Image: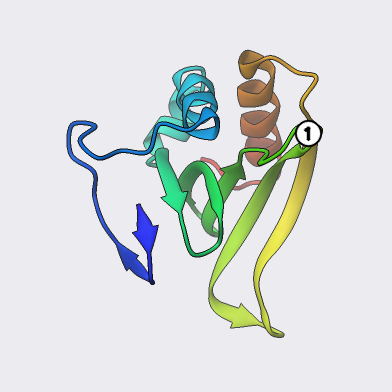
Amino acid sequence: MISEGIVRRVEGGKNAPNTPQVVRARTIANFLPLSCQRAGAKIVHNVDARYTGIRMETSTGPVVIEMPTEAGGVYRVVQEFIEPVKGKSERELVRFPQIYKPQGIAYMASEFLRSRGFLG
């Protein structure tokens, strides 16, 4: 969990948020392939940036699959910059509509990252 710029680990599910976005992120994370697991796929709940997603440390920096926050929203795959580039702290790579099942989102996101050289 990230709050006020401080990263806190939630051990054993104690005090973990249990929103629909977190449940969706856990479901998608269960279908991610081994290459994403090797990249350290973790569920993150960023209170400051107001998103819940699956974060992976790739060869080009952190990448997050953000869950939609409202009905009709989209899944976003975003590359986060450690140092802001031209005033931006992130770059959106691709969007997926909510019409896909969790297996489809996991597959499309992982294949997008693999084919673009983010995952080894």
In this picture, residue 81 sits left or right of residue 55: right
The residue depicted at 56 percent of the width and 56 percent of the height is 50
Q: Residue 13 in the image: x percent, y percent? A: 24, 32
Q: Quick check: 54 left or right of 101? A: left
Residue 112 versus residue 87 in the image, above or below: above
Query: For residue 4, which quarter of the picture?
Result: bottom left
Could you tell me residue 20's position as x and y percent? 53, 28
| Residue positioned 55% across, 33% down in the render | 21
- The image quadrant that residue 34 belongs to is top left
In the rendered image, the residue lying farthest to the bottom is 86
User: Is 35 left or right of 111, judged from the image as shown?
Assistant: left
* Residue 88 position by quadrant: bottom right
Q: Looking at the image, which is closer to me, 36 or 54?
A: 54
Amino acid at the residue labelled 1: Phe
Label 1: how many residues lie within 10 Å, few (<14), some (14-19) or many (20+)? Answer: some
Front-most of residues 14 and 60: 14
The residue where tag 1 is placed is 96
Image: 76 above or below 24: below
Q: Up-down: is 77 above or below 3?
A: above
Q: Is residue 39 visible?
A: no
Q: Residue 103 placed where, x, y %?
A: 62, 14
Say if residue 42 shows up in the picture.
yes
Image mark count: 1
User: Residue 31, position in %: x, y?
Assistant: 51, 17
Residue at the spot 46% in from the left edge and 57% down from the top edge: 47
* Vertical relation: 113 (above or below) 93: above
> Along the line of sight, which residue is nearer the eye, 63 or 53?
53
Q: Secondary structure at mark 1?
A: strand
Colour scheme of this structure image?
rainbow
